[in-house]
Amino acid sequence: MKNLIMLEFKKIKTGVIITTLLSVIYIILNINKQITSAVFENSLEPWIYAIDWYPLFFPLIVVIPTCWVNYYERKNKFINYTFPRISKRKILSSKIITYLTCSFLIMFLTIFIGGIYSFLIAKPNAFELTGSYTLSNNPLETRLILGSILVNQPIIYILLHSI
């Protein structure tokens, strides 16, 4: 079973790497666009707004590396060729495990690297707030889910949001 999973991963490895790199580049460019167009209270706010539409396209992003492999396997009748040697259940379960793992890695790495980029590298146009003034009527901690973790422990927030 482990060998089947490794074989499946080798088939889609380049597609997964290219898709992940393109997704990370998209997120980083979107973070930079957000930084230049607004003022933020926290260094992670551009990341939060940059990944706003990313989960909408997640199914398409995940299917891109795997669809061509499946298409060519069906076209060449590869699955019919391997059924007498290996059980159908092992083949299909190895494909499912590999595709689920790769889709998790694409999503996790893209959002995590974007969050780390926004927190450590990108510097938004922020300003120091004096007194009880904020950019909106309610503070950042109450506007977002897990907002207190965002303010106090941003790396943990990035990790939780990526998962």
Image: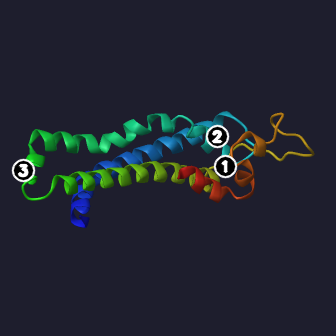
Label 1, residues with CA under 10 Å away: few <14, some 14-19, many ≥20: some
- Percent across and percent down for residue 107 are 45, 48
Q: Give the residue at x 48% y 34%.
A: 56
Mark closer to the observer (3, 2): 3
The residues tagged by marks 1 and 3 sit, at their Cα atoms, a distance apart of 55 Å
Disc 1 marks which residue?
123
Q: Secondary structure at mark 3?
A: helix
Label 2, residues with CA under 10 Å away: few <14, some 14-19, many ≥20: many
Left or right of 40 on screen, residue 71: left
Mark closer to the observer (1, 3): 3
Left or right of 21 on screen, residue 28: right
Question: Of label 2 and label 1, which has the lower sequence position?
Answer: 2
The residues tagged by marks 2 and 1 sit, at their Cα atoms, a distance apart of 8 Å
Please give the label number shown on residue 81: 3
Left or right of 114 on screen, residue 132: right
- Percent across and percent down for residue 83 are 10, 52
Q: Secondary structure at mark 2?
A: helix
- Percent across and percent down for residue 26 are 47, 41
Seen as rendered, the residue at the extreme bottom is 2
Question: Of label 3 and label 2, which has the lower sequence position?
Answer: 2
Specify the quadrant that holds the N terminus.
bottom left
Label 3, residues with CA under 10 Å away: few <14, some 14-19, many ≥20: few
Disc 2 marks which residue?
35
Q: Amino acid at mark 1?
A: Lys
Q: Amino acid at mark 3?
A: Tyr
- Percent across and percent down for residue 120 are 62, 56
Q: Give the residue at x 26% y 56%.
A: 94
Residue contact between numbered discs 2 and 1, judged by CB atoms under 8 Å: yes
